[in-house]
Image (spheres, rainbow, N blue to C red):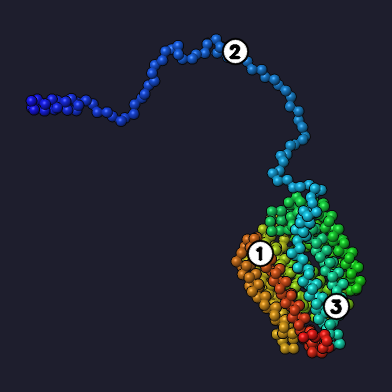
Amino acid sequence: MGNEELKDDDAHEAVIESQPKATTSAHVVTAESVQAEEVPTIPLGSLQTVSALQPEISVRPVQTTQSITVPAPLVVQPVENHRTLGEWRQIWWEGIRPSYFILALMPVLLGSILAWTQSISLQAPFGHFHPLRFIAVIIVVCLLQTGANLINDYYDYLNGIDTANVFGPGGLIQQRLVRPTSLLKIGLIVLGVGTVLGLLVAIAGGPLVYLFGLIGVLCAYFYSATARSLSSLALGELVGFLVFGPLTTAGAYIMQTGHLAASIFVFSLMPGFMAAAVIHVNNMRDAEGDAHVGKRTIAAILGLSWSRAWFLVLLLASYVIVLALGIPSHTPHLLLITFWTLPTLIVAISGVLRTDTPAGLDLVMRQTLRLEVYFVLLLIAALFVTAVLPVLPHLPEHLLPI
């Protein structure tokens, strides 16, 4: 029995091994066949009917027209008449660029304080100062500079200058905030009002103030006006030096004293050089755009390397003058406190030497403006203390409360 069962098992295994093994290769699966009547069909007559149909084509004339449809802009500026008073105030505040008023205010402040400190003596311990004239001069120079800035924006737009410069002028026209003609009219009106007010104020100063004022008004208009503007003839730094240096400082001095002293020109050179440095680095920032439209500036003529050197000359000239005034014996040594601005000076110098981008040069320009403010204020403080200290012991006791 046992041998027969083993034989049957062996035979069964032999049968299994003789059968073909299942393979995993891909094979085609066919669908089950269907009856012909189960497949949907379209009658042949219907297809013949569709092919026999012909589409109707109508020919119509196309009328030409001169009108052109322009798609609406994604961002639409509000209509001028629909702006609120607050919106207008913000627009014009940015357009007149009040940060640049420093260039005109610093020489007015210097000339007026210099006249006052020179009038302080033992006989007149409080000196002689005319506050109304001082305020009137400030209003006049601010009006003239505002008009000059607006007219400058108009002619820059007309000549294609600063059209793509985000660091340039106010850009009221480029942003379509104000119509070009409106900007020009307002600029001329402001310049005219400043001129008329200046004529009235100059009565107290005399012929020299009229002469300085006339030169200032002509420079304000022709700085950018006409195709042969002063700024396009590489005269921007020279105009800035004269207007924001000797002319304004001497004019403010004469308004307080009624006469002109030779020493005022020495002091007026310092804000003049500072203003020229600000204008020069501004032109360095805009050199690429100015060269593209054919505007010739010293920065565009010299190139970046020599423009940096010229900027250093203009900036350091004021410190050389202070050294000449403060180091010799029997001179007001207190003027040397202006060297407290050396950290700001180093920042401006290192900035102009390291950067060559418009954004970096714009930052250097703002640092130079800040440097001028600190420098002139320290200079004024030195003049005041130098003039007041000798007369303090001679003042009456009731004027010196403890």
Residue 246 visible in rendering: no
Q: Which residue is labeled 3 in the image?
A: 129
Do the residues under discs 1 and 2 have CB atoms within 8 angstroms?
no
Which residue is at the far bottom?
Answer: 394
Residue 30, image quadrant: top left
Residue 228 spot, x, y in % from top left? 78, 59
Q: Amino acid at mark 3?
A: Phe
Which residue does the image show at 65% across and 69% down from the upper left? 348
Q: Which mark is residue 52?
A: 2
- Mark 1 vs mark 2, foreground winner is 1
Give the farthest residue toward the front: 1
**Which residue is at a point 76% across and 63% down the rendered structure image?**
98
Looking at marks 3 and 1 on the same chain, the residue that comes earlier in the sequence is marked by 3
Q: Say left or right for 286 vs 51.
A: right
Q: Which mark is residue 87?
A: none
Dot placed on the residue nearer the N-terminal end, 3 or 2? 2
Q: Residues within 10 Å of mark 1 (few under 14, many from 20)?
A: some
Circle on res. 363: 1
Residue 304 visible at all: yes
Measure the alpha-carbon separation of dots 1 and 2. 80 Å
Q: Earlier in the sequence, mark 1 or mark 2?
A: 2
Give how far across and how far down residue 343 sits, in percent. 64, 74
Residue 105 sits above or below residue 128 on the image = above
At numbered mark 1, what does the secondary structure look like: helix, strand or loop?
helix
> Residues under labels 3 and 2: Cα distance?
108 Å
